[in-house]
Image (spheres, grey):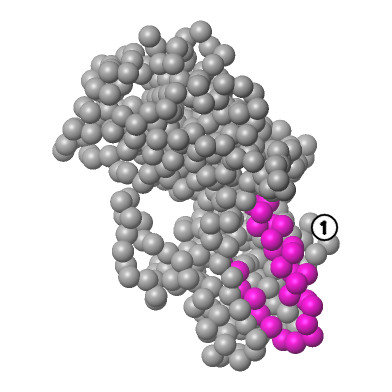
Amino acid sequence: MRNLLVAQSGGPTAAINATLAGVFQGAIGSDKVDHIYGAVNGIQGVLEERFVDLRELLSNTQDQELLSQTPAAALGSCRVKLKDPAKDPSDYEKIISVFRKHEIHYFIYIGGNDSMDTVDKLSAYVRAHGIEDIQVVGAPKTIDNDLMGTDHCPGFGSAAKYIATTFSELERDCHVYNVKAVTIVEVMGRNAGWLTAASALSRLNGGEGPALIYLCETAFDTEQFLKDVQEQLKVRDSVLVAVSEGVKDAQGRYLSEQTQSGAVDNFGHSYIAGAAGILEQLVRDRIGCKVRSIELNLMQRSAAHIASATDIRESQMLGRKACQCALDGKSGRMASIRRISDEPYRIELTDVPVSDSANAEKTVPREWINPKGNDVMPELIAYLKPLIQGESQVIYQNGIPCHIRLY
């Protein structure tokens, strides 16, 4: 028996299950794979041997189509950091024993930066111990679009489409009343402002979009922010602002840390949120006009009903690519996208060493942000625009989209 195991990790997206569907399609079409298992709750599920049989659960093409339009991680997720193998190899010894028990020869992990760290460590352990019959491969995922080694990440295009649409609709709503008002919208993004930049796409069809856009790549000055807002209030009644949740001051301190506890997750990342609320209070106290803050929160990553067809298609393709890498013995690699051109939009699928992506972050180039740090440049729009193209054919029942459950 030569079985394949796939798992998902980190924050879910509207496209992560399309990647899972791609892995499944690649595996089911190969004579190198017998059973296709899914681990429930990522690497934690591997350690605890909580597997489901995907051949049974995805027995027909309609189930696979439903999987591709289902938001969140259908196999569940986790945020578990494996121990340093040099100090404590117990996690890795356990994983290999589980693989041997279930005759797992191919393991594909779908996730972001921290998940690729798991792939990197596990593949290095396998290589260091001369285990040649187990292949460990990564498939990229993250709405933050901050993975190195790939032009863009599955899940980002759909989140960007949701954000562009939401800002387009908010901008119309904000102009209803003839009173001075400020609306501050907080967008996900710890250290990379790709998602916040996507708010500028709301201008594509002639709308004004946000008047001010603040990414986390530039130092955020609250006094300059107030000046920017006041300048905009001179020329318009309604000022719509997009701000990354991870904006920081010149000392690198998150604006949201003013109200946070300082707690961190398993990978040492600070819990951040609340930047818009802080700015709302600042505008209320210092400017005194009508002001509200909005935190888009989980909707950015779960709005599968408005997923980008380009994103879903590429996510499936990357799943199949990751599967092929595993079948070809390319352990320690990550499936990847290389962009050939913006117009016409053309890409090619490739693979890169997963070590290039593990614990690294790709941020928005400074030259794609305007000199004042409060808007984006045309080059960034050209990069973003192809990723939100196309509308997925969503299957509805009883007036709402249908989803699938795998466990």
**Residue 35, above or below 220:** above
Specify few, some or many for label 1: CA neighbours under 10 Å numbering under 14, 14-19, or 20 or more.
few
Q: Residue at x 39, y 12 (%)?
A: 2
In the image: residue 160, left or right of residue 20:
right
**Residue 2, above or below 25:** above
Q: Is mark 1 on a helix, strand or loop?
A: loop
Q: Which residue lies furthest to the front in this view?
A: 398
Q: Which residue is drawn at 37% across and 71% down?
A: 260
Which residue is at the front of the view, 4 or 369?
A: 4
Look at the image and tell me in which quarter the N terminus lies.
top left
Query: Circle 1 is placed at which residue position?
Result: 205
In the image: residue 19, left or right of residue 95:
right
Q: Is residue 234 visible?
A: no
Q: Residue at x 78, y 69 (%)?
A: 172
Q: State the extent of the magenta-drawn residues as a range.
A: 160-186
Give the quarter of the image for residue 10. Answer: top left
Residue 211 image position (x, y, % from top left): 70, 72
- Going by the numbered disc 1, the residue's amino acid type is Asn
